[in-house]
Image (spheres, helix red, strand yellow):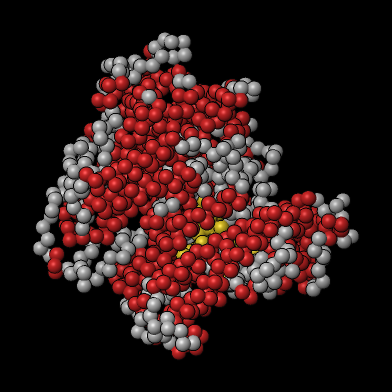
C-alpha cells in the first residue's frame, strides 16, 4: 500500500500554516478581496472635453499628478507578480496528514489564497495594460476605480448623512466617463471587464480548492472514503445524512440512486456574452492555478519550477488582453450546437465517468460493498435544444436539425473509437471467458482481437455520418450515394453496450475485475450517459405553427378551416384522424398547392418529415411552447403519425403564462380522458413548466405560487389516470427566470411528490460555462443535482396548510396586480423601459442566433424573457424579480394576517426560499445606478416620473422584505454574497457609468459615421460582458 495512515501519524509540518500580512486583509481593507489595498487619500483629476478640470473630480485631499503616485498605491501594479511568493502561500500545502493545520488555516481566513491568486493575476494584467496601451490608459483605469471606491465609502446614495458627498463623487464619475474618447472608453471598459473575468476564474478555482480541502480535512475520519465532499449538498454528505441521521434504510437509498435521473438540457439562449476564445483562455488560467496549488503543496519550488507556471499565466492573460473579445457575427444554430458538443468533448467526457466513479465509491462505503452504482445506471444525462429549438427562430430549419444530428453522431463515434483504442492498448491479457473465446477464436490476445472490429465499426460510423453531413451541406439532401451499409455501423447504443459488456463480463469471470474497472468502465458509463448521439435533441415549436399547418391541410382537403373550429370540433376531428390509418397527405403534397400552404406551414410539415427520417435516439421530446389546450397537444401527435414517425417523440406541452399554468390541470385531465391520446403515450407524460415567461407575465411571486400549485394539481391528475408524469423545468440563470444559485435548496423547495427521482431542467446560456466549463466545476454541479434529487425523495418537508394556501393566494393576487399595474397598464412603461435600458441595442449584438422577439411587432408581451431580464440586470435595477413583492408583503404585514406570514417564512422552506431569493436580488440591485441611466438616456418627462416611482417602490420593497425576515440589512446572513458585492460593486459601478455614456453616444451617433458606431457597439458589448461578469449572470 502506497499510503499508510500509520506512516504519517507523526508527520511534522514542513511549513507554518499562517497567512502573511500581505495575504490577509485587515478589518479596514476586508473588501479588497480582488485587487488588494485601497488607494486612500488620493483621488484623480481629469479634464473634461473643453480642457477644464471638473470640480466634481476634486473630492479628496489630492489629485494624481504622476503615474508613479498611482503605482505606489495601486494593487494592480505589484512588482514581480507571481503565484509563488513564499510569504503569501505559507498555508498553501494541503496534505491530508496536515489536516489539523489546514483546518486552522481555513478557519482563520478562507480567502487568503484567493486574494493572493487574484492579486498576482490582477498585477499581471495591470502590467500588460501599461506595456500595451501606455501609462495614460492605466492612469485612467485607476482614476475611475478610485472614484467608484470613494463613492461606495460615501454610502453610494443610501446614507442620507453623506448624500451630498456621494452625489458629488458620482457626478465626477459621470463627467470622467464623458471626458474619455470613444477609443479610451472602450479600453478602460475592457480593463474592468477583464479584471472581473480574472476574479471569476480565480473564484471558480477557489471553490474547487475548498472542496478538495474539505475532502483532505476529513480524510482521516473513520469510514470516510474521501471520494466526495462531506457538505450537505454533496452525495458524500447527503448519503450518510440520510442513513445515519434520518435512519433511512440503506437499501432504500440505493434503490433511489440507481433509478433516479437528472437530465440537464443544454440550450442556446443568447446570454453567453463571452467569446469561446476568451472562455478557453480563462479555462487555461484555471488550469494553471490548479497546477500551482499542486506544485506549492509538494514543497519548495525552484525558480525554474515557478517559471513553468508564471510564464504560461502571463502568456494567457497577455493573450486575453490582446484578443478581440467581441463577436463579429451572429452564431448560426450549427455553431451554437458545436459549442455545446465542445463542452461535452473537452470537459464532460471525462467529468461524467469521474463523478460516477466517486459516487460509486461513496455508495459502497456508506451503503455497503454490494450497493455500488450499476454500470448501466445513468443518474446524470444530457440533452440539447441547440439545433432543435425553432420556437421563434426562423434560422432553425429542418436541414439544420439534420445537420446537427449527423454532426453529433460523427463526434460521438470518434470519441468512442478513441477510447476503445485506448482500452485495446491496455488489455493485453491472454485469458478470457468461453463466451468471448467463441468469438475471437485462438487469438493470442483475445481482448485486442475483439476490440479491433468494434473500433473499425465506430470509425465507419463516423465516416457514414460525416459523408451524409457533407452531402447535405453540399447538395441539400442526404439521399443517394451511400457507400456504407447501416449493417456495418453502430446506430443504437444497445449494440455498442452489448459488445462492451461482453468484455466486462469476461474480465470479471477470469479474475480480472480490477482491469474491468479501468477505462472500460468509464466507456460504459459514457455510453449510458451520452449514447451514440452525444445529446438527443428536443424539437420545440410554438402551438400556433401546428394550428396553421393543420388549417392548411383541412382547407386543402375541403374540410373547412381548422383555425376557425372550436375546441370540441378540433378534438373530435383529431381523435377521428388518429384512429384512422389513412394519411392526410403524401410527403411533399404541400408543394402542389402553394396558394394554400404558406411557407411557414411547409416548414412545419417538413420538420415532421425530418423527424420521421431520424434514427431512434437522435431526438428526445417535442416541446410545444405557448400551449393552451388539449388540441394543441393532440395536433403534434397527429402530425407525427401522419408523417410516418415510427416511434413517436414524447409530446411535452409547455405551460408558461399565469393563465396557462392555472389551466394546465384541466387541460391534461381532458387529454388523458381521450383514449386515442392515452393509447399512444405508453402510460408516460412529460410536462414542461415555464419559469421565465410566467414571471414576465405575472411577476416572480405570483408565478412561483402558480408553478407550485400547478405541479401539485398535475400530479393528482396523473394519479387519477395512472400516468407516470415527469416535469421538465424551464429555468434560466437569473432569479427572474426561475434560477437559484443555491441549487440544492431550490430542488428541496419544490412541492413534495412532484420530482420523485426524475428531474429534467434546462441549463441556459452563460450557465453552461459557469457550471460545466471546467472539470471539477462540472463534477461539483453533477454532485449537487444528484444529492438534491436523492435528498428530495427522502427528506420530510412541511406542506402548506390551508391557512398558508389562502395566504399565498392573497399575496399572489396583490403582487400580480401591482406588477401588471406597472408593466402592462401604465402607458409610460414601454417608452421608459426602451429608453432606460439597453433593450433596443441587444438585438444588434452577436450573442445568439435567435431574434429577441417572437414576432417583429409588439411590446413587452412579445419580448422574450431573456432580453427582458437581460436589460434590467444590466442597469442593476433587476425589476422583474422584485416588482409586486413589496406591495404584497407590506399589505399583509399591516393586517391581522401579519403573524401568519411571518410563520410561513420561518417554517415553510418553499416560501422562505422565494423570499430569500428576492432579498438576494435586492442586495445586488443599485437604484442609484438605475437613476443614472434615467438621467443619461430618458428624455420624456412622464417616463422619468415612472422611473422615480419605480425606484421608490424598490426602496419600499427593501423595507418590506427586511421587516418580514427580521434582518437589519439585506442578506445579512449571507456573508459570501455580502463580501463579494462589497468587492465587486466598485468595478461594476464603473462599468455601468461607462455603459450609460456609451448608450448615450450610440443613440446620438449619426448613422453615416460607421467607424464611430462600430467602436461604440464594441464598447457596449464590452460593458455588457463586464457587468455580466460582475453580477454573475446576464439574462
Residue 872 appears at what percent x and percent y? 51, 37
In terms of image quadrants, where is residue 328?
Answer: top right
Q: Is residue 524 above or below residue 914?
A: below
The residue that appears at 18% across and 50% down in the rendered structure is: 300
Residue placed most toward the observer, 231 or 747: 231
Residue placed most toward the observer, 323 or 149: 323
In terms of image quadrants, where is residue 357?
Answer: bottom left
Residue placed most toward the observer, 1012 or 850: 1012
In terms of image quadrants, where is residue 584?
Answer: bottom right
Residue 509 appears at what percent x and percent y? 39, 86
Q: Is residue 935 left or right of residue 742?
A: right
**Quadrant in the picture for the N terminus:** bottom left
Q: Is residue 683 left or right of residue 72?
A: right
Q: Is residue 693 above or below residue 238?
A: above
Residue 770 appears at what percent x and percent y? 43, 49
User: In this view, which residue lies farthest toward the right?
Assistant: 558
Number of dots carrying numbers: 0
Residue 169 appears at what percent x and percent y? 37, 21
Q: Is residue 942 left or right of residue 345?
A: right
Q: Is residue 291 above or below residue 442?
A: above
The residue that appears at 54% across and 24% down in the rendered structure is: 1000
The residue that appears at 50% across and 54% down in the rendered structure is: 342
Q: Is residue 221 visible?
A: yes
The residue that appears at 46% across and 39% down in the rendered structure is: 1028
Q: Is residue 299 above or below residue 353?
A: above
Residue placed most toward the observer, 290 or 243: 290
Amino acid at each position: 500500500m502506497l499510503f499508510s495512515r500509520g506512516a504519517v501519524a507523526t508527520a511534522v509540518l514542513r511549513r507554518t500554516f499562517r497567512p502573511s500580512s500581505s495575504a490577509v486583509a485587515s478589518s479596514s481593507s476586508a473588501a479588497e478581496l480582488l485587487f488588494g489595498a485601497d488607494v486612500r487619500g488620493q483621488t484623480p483629476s481629469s479634464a473634461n472635453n473643453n480642457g477644464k478640470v471638473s470640480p466634481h473630480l476634486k473630492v479628496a485631499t489630492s489629485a494624481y499628478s504622476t503615474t508613479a503616485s498611482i503605482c505606489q498605491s495601486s494593487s494592480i501594479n505589484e512588482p514581480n507578480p507571481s503565484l509563488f511568493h513564499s510569504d503569501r502561500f505559507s498555508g498553501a500545502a494541503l496534505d491530508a496528514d496536515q489536516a489539523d493545520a489546514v483546518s486552522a488555516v481555513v478557519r482563520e481566513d478562507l480567502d487568503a489564497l484567493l486574494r493572493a491568486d487574484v492579486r498576482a493575476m490582477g498585477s499581471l494584467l495591470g502590467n500588460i495594460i501599461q506595456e500595451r496601451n501606455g501609462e495614460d490608459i492605466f492612469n485612467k483605469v485607476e482614476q475611475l476605480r478610485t472614484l467608484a471606491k470613494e463613492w461606495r465609502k460615501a454610502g453610494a446614495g443610501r446614507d442620507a448623512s453623506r448624500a451630498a458627498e456621494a452625489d458629488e463623487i458620482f457626478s465626477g464619475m459621470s463627467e470622467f466617463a464623458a471626458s474619455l474618447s470613444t477609443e479610451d472608453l472602450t479600453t478602460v471598459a475592457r480593463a474592468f471587464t477583464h479584471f472581473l473575468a480574472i476574479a471569476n476564474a480565480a473564484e471558480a478555482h477557489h471553490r474547487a480548492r475548498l472542496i478538495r480541502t474539505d475532502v483532505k480535512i476529513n480524510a482521516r475520519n473513520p469510514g470516510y472514503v474521501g471520494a466526495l465532499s462531506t457538505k450537505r449538498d454533496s452525495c458524500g454528505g447527503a448519503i450518510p445524512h440520510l442513513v445515519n441521521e434520518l435512519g433511512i434504510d440503506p437499501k432504500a437509498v440505493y434503490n433511489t440512486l440507481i433509478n433516479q435521473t437528472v437530465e440537464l438540457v443544454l440550450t442556446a439562449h443568447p446570454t453567453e456574452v463571452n467569446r469561446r476564445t476568451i472562455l478557453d483562455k480563462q479555462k487555461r488560467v484555471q488550469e494553471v492555478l490548479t497546477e500551482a496549488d499542486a506544485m506549492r503543496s509538494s514543497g519548495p519550488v525552484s525558480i525554474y519550477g515557478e517559471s513553468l507556471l508564471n510564464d504560461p499565466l502571463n502568456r494567457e492573460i497577455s493573450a486575453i488582453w490582446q484578443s478581440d473579445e467581441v463577436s463579429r457575427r451572429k452564431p448560426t444554430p450549427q455553431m451554437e450546437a458545436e459549442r455545446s458538443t465542445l463542452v461535452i468533448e473537452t470537459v464532460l467526457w471525462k467529468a461524467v465517468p469521474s463523478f460516477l466513479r466517486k459516487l460509486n465509491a461513496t455508495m459502497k462505503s456508506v451503503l455497503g460493498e454490494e450497493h455500488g452504482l450499476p454500470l448501466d445506471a445513468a443518474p446524470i444525462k444530457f440533452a440539447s435544444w441547440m439545433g432543435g429549438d425553432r420556437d421563434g427562430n426562423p434560422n432553425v430549419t429542418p436541414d439544420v436539425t439534420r445537420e446537427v444530428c449527423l454532426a453529433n453522431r460523427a463526434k460521438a463515434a470518434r470519441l468512442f473509437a478513441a477510447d476503445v483504442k485506448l482500452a485495446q492498448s491496455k488489455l493485453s491479457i491472454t485469458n478470457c471467458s468461453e463466451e468471448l473465446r467463441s468469438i475471437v477464436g485462438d487469438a493470442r490476445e483475445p481482448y485486442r482481437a475483439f476490440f479491433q472490429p468494434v473500433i473499425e465499426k465506430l470509425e465507419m460510423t463516423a465516416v457514414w455520418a460525416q459523408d451524409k453531413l457533407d452531402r447535405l451541406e453540399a447538395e441539400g439532401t442526404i439521399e443517394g450515394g451511400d457507400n456504407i451499409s447501416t449493417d456495418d455501423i453502430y446506430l443504437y447504443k444497445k449494440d455498442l453496450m452489448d459488445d462492451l459488456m461482453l468484455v466486462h463480463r469476461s474480465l470479471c469471470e477470469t479474475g480480472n475485475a480490477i482491469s474491468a474497472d479501468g477505462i472500460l468502465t468509464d466507456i460504459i458509463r459514457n455510453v449510458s450517459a451520452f449514447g451514440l448521439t452525444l445529446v438527443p435533441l428536443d424539437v420545440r415549436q410554438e402551438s400556433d405553427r401546428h394550428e396553421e399547418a393543420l388549417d392548411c391541410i383541412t382547407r386543402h382537403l375541403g374540410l373547412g378551416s381548422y383555425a376557425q373550429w372550436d375546441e370540441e370540433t378540433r378534438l373530435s376531428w383529431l381523435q377521428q384522424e388518429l384512429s384512422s390509418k389513412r394519411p392526410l397527405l403524401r410527403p411533399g403534397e404541400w408543394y402542389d398547392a402553394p396558394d394554400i400552404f404558406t411557407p411557414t406551414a411547409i416548414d412545419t410539415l417538413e420538420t415532421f418529415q425530418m423527424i420521421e427520417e431520424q434514427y431512434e435516439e437522435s431526438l428526445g421530446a417535442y416541446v410545444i411552447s405557448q400551449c393552451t389546450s388539449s388540441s394543441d397537444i393532440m395536433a403534434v401527435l397527429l402530425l407525427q403519425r401522419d408523417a410516418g414517425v415510427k416511434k413517436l417523440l414524447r409530446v411535452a406541452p409547455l405551460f408558461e403564462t399565469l393563465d396557462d399554468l392555472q389551466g394546465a390541470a384541466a387541460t391534461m385531465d381532458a387529454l388523458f380522458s381521450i383514449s386515442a391520446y392515452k393509447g399512444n403515450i405508453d402510460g408516460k407524460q412529460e410536462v414542461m413548466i415555464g419559469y421565465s415567461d410566467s414571471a414576465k407575465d405575472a411577476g416572480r411571486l405570483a408565478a412561483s405560487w402558480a408553478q407550485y400549485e400547478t405541479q401539485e394539481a398535475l400530479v393528482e391528475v396523473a394519479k387519477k389516470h395512472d400516468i407516470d408524469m415527469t416535469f421538465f423545468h424551464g429555468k434560466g440563470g437569473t432569479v427572474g427566470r426561475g434560477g437559484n444559485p443555491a441549487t440544492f435548496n431550490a430542488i428541496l423547495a419544490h412541492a413534495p411528490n412532484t420530482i420523485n427521482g426524475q428531474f429534467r431542467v434546462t441549463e441556459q446560456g452563460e450557465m453552461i460555462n459557469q457550471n460545466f466549463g471546467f472539470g471539477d466545476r462540472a463534477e461539483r454541479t453533477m454532485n449537487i443535482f444528484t444529492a438534491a434529487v436523492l435528498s428530495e425523495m427522502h427528506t420530510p418537508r412541511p406542506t402548506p396548510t390551508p391557512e398558508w394556501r389562502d395566504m399565498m393566494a392573497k399575496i399572489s393576487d396583490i403582487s400580480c396586480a401591482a406588477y401588471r399595474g406597472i408593466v402592462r397598464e401604465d402607458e409610460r412603461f414601454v417608452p421608459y423601459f426602451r429608453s432606460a435600458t439597453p433593450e433596443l441595442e441587444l438585438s444588434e449584438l452577436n450573442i445568439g442566433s435567435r431574434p429577441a422577439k417572437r414576432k417583429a411587432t409588439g411590446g413587452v408581451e412579445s419580448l422574450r424573457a431573456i432580453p427582458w431580464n437581460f436589460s434590467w440586470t444590466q442597469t442593476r435595477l433587476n425589476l422583474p424579480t422584485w416588482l409586486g413583492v413589496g406591495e404584497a408583503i407590506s399589505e399583509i404585514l399591516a393586517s391581522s394576517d401579519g403573524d401568519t406570514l411571518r410563520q410561513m417564512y420561518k417554517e415553510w422552506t418553499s416560501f422562505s426560499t422565494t423570499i430569500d431569493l428576492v432579498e438576494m436580488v435586492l442586495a445586488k440591485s443599485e437604484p442609484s445606478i438605475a437613476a443614472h441611466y434615467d438621467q443619461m438616456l430618458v428624455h420624456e418627462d412622464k417616463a422619468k416620473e415612472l422611473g422615480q416611482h419605480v425606484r421608490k417602490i424598490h426602496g419600499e420593497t427593501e423595507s418590506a422584505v427586511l421587516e418580514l425576515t427580521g434582518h437589519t440589512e439585506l442578506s445579512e446572513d449571507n456573508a459570501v454574497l455580502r463580501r463579494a458585492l462589497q468587492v465587486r460593486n466598485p468595478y461594476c459601478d464603473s462599468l455601468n457609468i461607462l455603459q450609460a455614456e456609451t448608450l448615450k453616444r450610440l443613440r446620438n451617433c449619426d448613422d453615416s459615421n460607421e467607424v464611430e458606431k462600430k467602436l461604440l457597439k464594441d464598447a457596449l458589448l464590452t460593458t455588457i460582458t463586464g457587468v455580466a461578469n460582475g453580477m454573475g449572470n446576464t439574462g
